[in-house]
């Protein structure tokens, strides 16, 4: 048992504890039951010797120079206090925290308190149930955050999210102090970024409406958040304009200080250009702001709505700010009797620099609120369309520019560079609306973000080198989203070889077990469900939109690496074509976008400007010469996967035509096969032996059309206006077992066939589809069937370059002669006396056994097990042979299995 007088023991006597504190810090303790004394304690008999410090006490209520004024002595005493503030007793916690609060009032002590390591303990106490303790912890953090040298470290120690949570405290004092701490910390831009990444902006906007006692301080925080680029976007996304205008409209602001901060926050948003103006106009800012008047003295006060709008000569002209037309758009009202369109920049107001530091309440004058002197002109031209802004610099336009130059500039901003936009007398002109900007897309996506989930998966991959066991398990996280029928979608590679899958909703701390319903390896999509009914409460499934067009705005939402909160990236559709899917090793329709897709984004939805899902993020292009090139799985592929599952109760795959073809772009080639000048198509080179059409179509046939759609000489078909795409897209729209009308040219004769479509059977499959790898062992020879995962395991991600040439040739060009044909190799040789001289054989194809061709791994195992010949002879490629005595080989096999702890000489699928 520990000594009862030991200050590190949370159970020691409270009387002794109070005397210890009085020796260290003899000024008043707000939460102590004992009143402060003006005389030093006289009785030291019951105090430990190390705490006897009469010389340390001074009647002035402050520690003398021999104690806390000494930096080393202060650190020692803070070290003694640090374990006490997380004591098991709230009274001890409160008394210790009171000491820290008093110490933190001195600016000289604040840095030393940070160095003592006290911040994590204070952060922990913000979550306590004791309101007294929570209040003191919040006050201490508020005091410590005042010091500029502490702001960075407090932010790095993870205090910001806890302070945001404390804003909801039942104690108004704790909430106020937390808000003040956030204000001081948000003066540092890096802390603003952390607050934004933690989705704190949405919490602050909600509290501005519901917590009257926090409005003044939170408005200061809003102003600070707007000083960084991420904060500007986050505030507009969270509805800051609507909330701030609502405060003004409802009359919730009670002081001039609150009025000014609210207007200052709006003013900072106004520098963000067209988006603010559109939102301000939508929420009737002109009518709301007419309730505010600025007197000549520079003070604000509420004012009833007047017939004429008020002016603000010292600060800004709200009316011009709200009413001027956005630079990227032309007013939809028809204009008449004007020869030229007036430049919007002629009405550019002078506005405050939104990065100017916000004054503290102490800076207010006694007669009214002092308007900050630092102002800056908006003199730059209004922000152009976001899509054009990335490739052009914003130029400052002289006010005296000619009408032709101004109209030409407006024409450029609207995407028309052919001629100046002129309006003749009595002519009505209504230009087409510009493409939807990315910020508006994000605004419409926000309501659908609750359907996006984080997927946690534990994987246990097969070990192809030792196929009788699996690799060490590992965990991964990715994204997914909810669809109808209590189902979720994510990427197939996100749950491949899964042993456990869990999902977590946005804003929830609960992970729910999920079941994998189907995995589409070709299309890289997986379908999940959750059996717990609680998961589905309060969620709405996403709706699917149409295939996007080029330059359409898209927003990718997910949980990429680098944080636990949801992430939103925006871009536009830059390309649409048949892509090679990295996971499925197949070619399907894909959409290229310029939004960033990082690890963890996989499986997340991509939204269009209407908030509907138009794709699933699944891969990106990584190259030193490119950046921000990502790919999404489009809705036609997604709907094919969903309908396939609903139709067949399982995923059956995407069918293929089963032919290899050649372009017919050369005119001599076309004439040689009897094609007329107006005929187009592609020539069949080879036909898959396992394909249903192998007995219908023939090599050298020319495919003219598929299902009534003409095929061009380069193998493309008309897709949409001005776009062409590979005709394999038409095939991929079918389902396994469907029939298609194929028109071919054979010997100058046009023939039509109804062909049944089937899935692709490759000699070397791209996936083993969740099954364990097959193997067979005899006399230490490990035989395996080759697959793409096998090659990747043996030769790494660059297997296409490092694998043996003959295996690569078969991977690229060989066709399976039957559905059950496999490429069997000697994977390795487990060294033993029986196989001396054969140790170096590795990944070499087995062609025959005892003179009989090897069709697959099962046929080899059956032939070896039933062999009654004296010798076993394996014919390998490169004219190698392996000869073993039958009886010796079978006896040695048992010993080798025991030596290497192998449970069986063959995999389970070969035993049936």
Image (cartoon, rainbow, N blue to C red):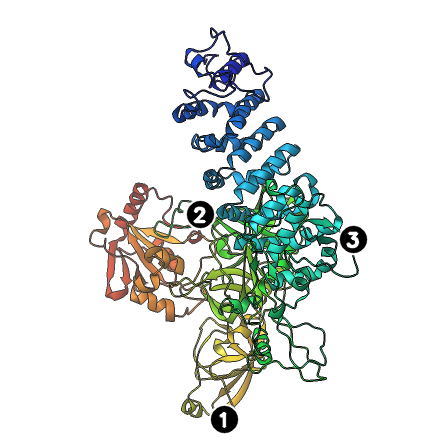
> Of helix, strand and loop, which one carries label 3?
loop
- Residue 234, above or below 273: above
Tell which circle, 3 or 2, labels the residue nearer the N-terminal end: 3
Pick whichever, 566 or 649, lies toward us: 566
- Residue at which label 1 appears: 676
Q: Position of residue 290 (x, y in %)?
A: 74, 57
Q: Position of residue 543 (x, y in %)?
A: 65, 60
Which label sits on residue 59? none
Tell which circle, 1 or 2, labels the residue nearer the N-terminal end: 2
Which label sits on residue 460? 2
- Residue 401, above or below 641: below
Task: Sort mark 3 into few (<14), some (14-19) or many (20+) by Cα contacts within 10 Å.
Answer: few
Whether label 3 touches label 1, CB < 8 Å: no
> Of helix, strand and loop, which one carries label 2?
loop
- Residue at which label 3 appears: 304
Instruction: Please state if 149 lies on the left or on the right of 545 as rendered.
Output: left
């Amino acid at each position: 048992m520990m000594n009862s007088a030991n200050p590190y023991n949370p159970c020691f006597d409270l009387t002794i504890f109070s005397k210890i504190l009085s020796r260290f810090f003899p000024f008043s303790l707000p939460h102590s039951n004992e009143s402060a004394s003006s005389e030093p304690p006289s009785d030291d008999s019951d105090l430990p010797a190390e705490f006897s410090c009469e010389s340390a006490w001074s009647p002035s209520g402050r520690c003398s120079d021999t104690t806390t004024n000494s930096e080393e002595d202060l650190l020692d005493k803070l070290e003694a206090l640090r374990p006490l503030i997380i004591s098991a007793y709230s009274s001890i916690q409160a008394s210790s925290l009171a000491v820290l609060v008093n110490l933190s009032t001195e600016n000289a002590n604040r840095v030393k308190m940070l160095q003592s390591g006290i911040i994590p303990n204070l952060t922990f106490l913000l979550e306590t149930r004791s309101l007294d303790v929570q209040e003191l912890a919040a006050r201490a953090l508020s005091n410590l955050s005042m010091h500029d040298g502490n702001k960075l470290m407090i932010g790095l120690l993870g205090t910001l999210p806890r302070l945001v949570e404390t804003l909801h405290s039942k104690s108004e004092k704790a909430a106020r102090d937390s808000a003040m701490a956030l204000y001081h910390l948000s003066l540092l831009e890096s802390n603003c970024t952390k607050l934004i990444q933690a989705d704190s902006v949405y919490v602050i906007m909600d509290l501005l409406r519901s917590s009257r006692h926090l409005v003044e301080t939170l408005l200061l925080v809003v102003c600070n958040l707007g000083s960084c680029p991420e904060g500007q976007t986050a505030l507009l996304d969270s509805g800051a304009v609507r909330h701030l205008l609502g405060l003004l409209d409802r009359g919730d602001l009670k002081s001039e200080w609150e009025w000014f901060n609210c207007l200052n926050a709006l003013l900072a948003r106004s520098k963000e250009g067209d988006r603010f103006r559109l939102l301000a106009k939508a929420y009737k800012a002109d009518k709301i702001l007419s309730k505010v008047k600025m007197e000549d003295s520079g003070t604000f006060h509420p004012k009833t709505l007047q017939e004429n709008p008020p002016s603000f000569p010292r600060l800004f002209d709200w009316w011009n700010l709200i009413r001027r037309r956005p630079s990227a758009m032309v007013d939809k009202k028809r204009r008449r009797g004007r020869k030229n369109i007036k430049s919007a920049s002629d009405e550019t107001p002078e506005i405050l620099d939104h990065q100017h530091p916000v004054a503290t309440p102490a800076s207010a004058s006694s007669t009214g609120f002092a308007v900050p002197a630092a102002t800056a002109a908006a003199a730059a031209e209004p922000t152009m369309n976001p899509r054009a802004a990335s490739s052009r610099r914003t130029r400052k336009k002289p006010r005296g520019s000619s009408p032709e130059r101004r109209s030409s500039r407006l024409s450029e901003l609207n995407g028309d560079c052919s001629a100046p936009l002129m309006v003749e007398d009595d002519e009505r002109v209504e230009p087409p609306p510009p493409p939807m900007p990315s910020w508006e897309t994000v605004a419409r996506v926000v309501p659908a973000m609750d359907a996006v989930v984080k997927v946690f998966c534990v994987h246990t991959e097969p070990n192809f080198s030792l196929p009788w066991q699996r690799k060490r398990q590992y965990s991964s996280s990715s994204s997914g989203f909810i669809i109808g029928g209590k189902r979720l979608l994510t990427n197939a590679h996100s749950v491949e070889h899964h042993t456990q899958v869990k999902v977590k909703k946005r804003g929830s701390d609960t992970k729910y077990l999920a079941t994998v319903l189907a995995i589409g390896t070709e299309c890289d999509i997986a379908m999940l469900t959750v059996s717990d009914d609680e998961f589905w409460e309060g969620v709405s499934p996403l709706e699917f939109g149409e295939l996007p067009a080029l330059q359409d705005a898209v927003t990718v939402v997910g949980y990429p690496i680098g944080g636990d909160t949801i992430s939103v990236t925006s871009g536009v559709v830059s390309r649409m074509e048949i892509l090679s899917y990295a996971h499925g090793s197949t070619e399907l329709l894909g959409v290229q976008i310029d939004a960033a897709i990082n690890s963890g984004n996989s499986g997340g939805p991509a939204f269009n400007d209407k908030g509907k899902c138009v794709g699933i993020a699944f891969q990106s292009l990584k190259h030193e010469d490119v950046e921000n090139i990502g790919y999404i799985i489009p809705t036609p592929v997604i709907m094919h996967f969903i309908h396939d599952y609903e139709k067949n109760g399982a995923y059956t795959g995407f069918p293929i035509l089963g032919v290899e073809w050649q372009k017919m772009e050369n005119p001599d080639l076309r004439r040689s096969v009897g094609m007329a000048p107006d005929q187009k198509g592609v020539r069949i080179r080879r036909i898959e032996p396992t394909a249903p059409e192998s007995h219908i179509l023939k090599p050298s046939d020319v495919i003219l059309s598929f299902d009534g759609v003409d095929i061009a000489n380069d193998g493309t078909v008309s897709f949409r206006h001005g776009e062409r795409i590979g005709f394999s897209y038409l095939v991929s729209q079918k389902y396994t077992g469907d029939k298609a009308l194929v028109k071919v040219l054979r010997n100058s004769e046009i023939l039509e066939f109804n062909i049944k479509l089937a899935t692709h059977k490759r000699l070397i499959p791209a996936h083993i589809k969740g099954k364990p790898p097959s193997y067979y062992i005899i006399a230490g020879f490990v035989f395996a069937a080759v697959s793409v995962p096998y090659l990747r395991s043996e030769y790494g991600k660059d297997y296409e370059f490092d694998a043996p040439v003959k295996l690569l040739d078969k991977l690229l060009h060989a066709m399976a002669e039957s559905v059950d044909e496999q490429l069997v190799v000697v994977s390795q040789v487990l060294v033993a006396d029986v196989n001396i001289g054969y140790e170096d054989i590795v990944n070499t194809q087995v062609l025959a056994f005892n003179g009989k061709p090897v069709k697959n791994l099962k046929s080899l195992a059956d032939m070896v097990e039933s062999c009654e010949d004296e010798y076993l002879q394996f014919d390998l490629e490169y004219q190698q042979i392996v000869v073993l005595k039958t009886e010796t080989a079978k006896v040695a096999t048992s010993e080798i299995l025991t030596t290497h702890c192998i449970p069986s000489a063959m995999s389970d699928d070969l035993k049936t």
